[in-house]
Amino acid sequence: MISILGKSNIAQRATNEDRFVADSNWGIALVADGMGGPAAGEIAASIVANQVTDLLDQGTPLAAAVYSAHQEVLRAVEDGRGKTGMGSTVVVAHFSGHHFELAWIGDSRAYLWNGELRQISRDHSQVEAMMSRGEISYSEAISHPNKNIITRAIGHGKFNEHDIPLIKGALFHGEKLLLCSDGLYDAVAACDIARVMNSAISSEHQLDQLLAIALANNGADNITAVLVDSDVIPQENEIIPTLPLVAIARIDGFTEHFTA
């Protein structure tokens, strides 16, 4: 079985434009980070969270559900719900037992903890593209002035269902899947996230610690994280999907980023 928990904090913003879904019964873990300011970003993120959740519950494939949310945000702008220019990121995992599919748009991230923190989603962002072209290093990207400029978002630009990254994985005992908005990883170094994940405390207390560290580090943006646990033991001869590896962080301070 899996267990899914989520927490969010407004931090230093006037409103919370993040939304999350953490539902163990539906097997849905989702983080959406809205953009567009008051009366816009939170509307876009809410549309994404509600649309994706409803469609997955109806049996819609994950990529189709995410693309439908993109179309719904565009329609909302035309209908006068929210404001022109509003949009949202999304990272969502849909579980069937301990197996999951993961999709994302934007720079909200997915990490797998299995003794080290492994970033498994690759940001749709300007600095990620610059790193892939070899123009800047991983350490330079962390403090780059354009680090929050994303190149794809729900409700922005033209893309289709086939442009949505989709990966498959499985979660076992001793592993955790962490989904979060940039408000968390911008304020908490990857190695510090790893140290919290390595601590022998409950998932709820791990979430509390992650948010507390982000706030103590003067995290300015809304901070949202969803954490998935599994108690499943791998069966003999079970085929375990290989997940992509974007970056690694360890509790000893070691970090490494891998370009596409």
Image (cartoon, rainbow, N blue to C red):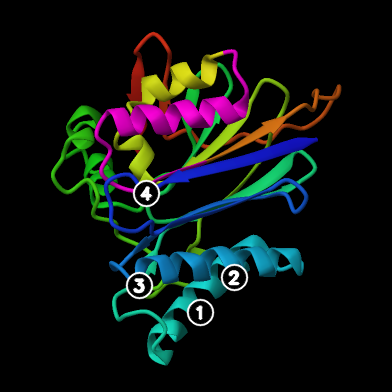
Of pointers 2 and 1, the one earlier in the residue sequence: 2
The residue sitting at 34% across, 20% down in the picture is: 255
In this rendering, is residue 162 above or below 25? below
From the image, state whether disc 3 or disc 4 is nearer to you: 4
Of pointers 3 and 4, the one earlier in the residue sequence: 4
Give the CA distance from mark 2 to mark 1. Answer: 8 Å
Q: Which residues are magenta?
A: 200-225
Give the CA distance from mark 2 to mark 3. Answer: 16 Å
Quadrant of the frame with the N terminus: top right
The residue sitting at 62% across, 23% down in the picture is: 202
From the image, state whether disc 2 or disc 4 is nearer to you: 4
What amino acid is found at the position of numbered circle 3 in the picture? Ala
Q: Which mark is residue 72?
A: 1
Of pointers 2 and 3, the one earlier in the residue sequence: 3
Query: Circle 2 sits on which residue?
Result: 51
Give the CA distance from mark 1 to mark 4. Answer: 25 Å
Query: Circle 3 sits on which residue?
Result: 40
Quarter where residue 112 is shown: top right
From the image, state whether disc 3 or disc 1 is nearer to you: 3
User: Do the residues under discs 3 and 4 have CB atoms within 8 angstroms?
Assistant: no
Q: Does residue 223 show up magenta in the picture?
A: yes
Element class at badge 1: helix
What percent of the width, then of the height, locates residue 234? 80, 24
Q: Is residue 215 visible?
A: yes
Other-residue count near label 4 (Cα within 10 Å), few / some / many at <14 / 14–19 / ≥20: some
Q: Which mark is residue 112?
A: none
What percent of the width, then of the height, locates residue 89? 41, 58
Element class at badge 2: helix
Query: Circle 4 sits on which residue?
Result: 10
What amino acid is found at the position of numbered circle 1 in the picture? Glu
What amino acid is found at the position of numbered circle 2 in the picture? Gln
Give the CA distance from mark 3 to mark 1. Answer: 14 Å
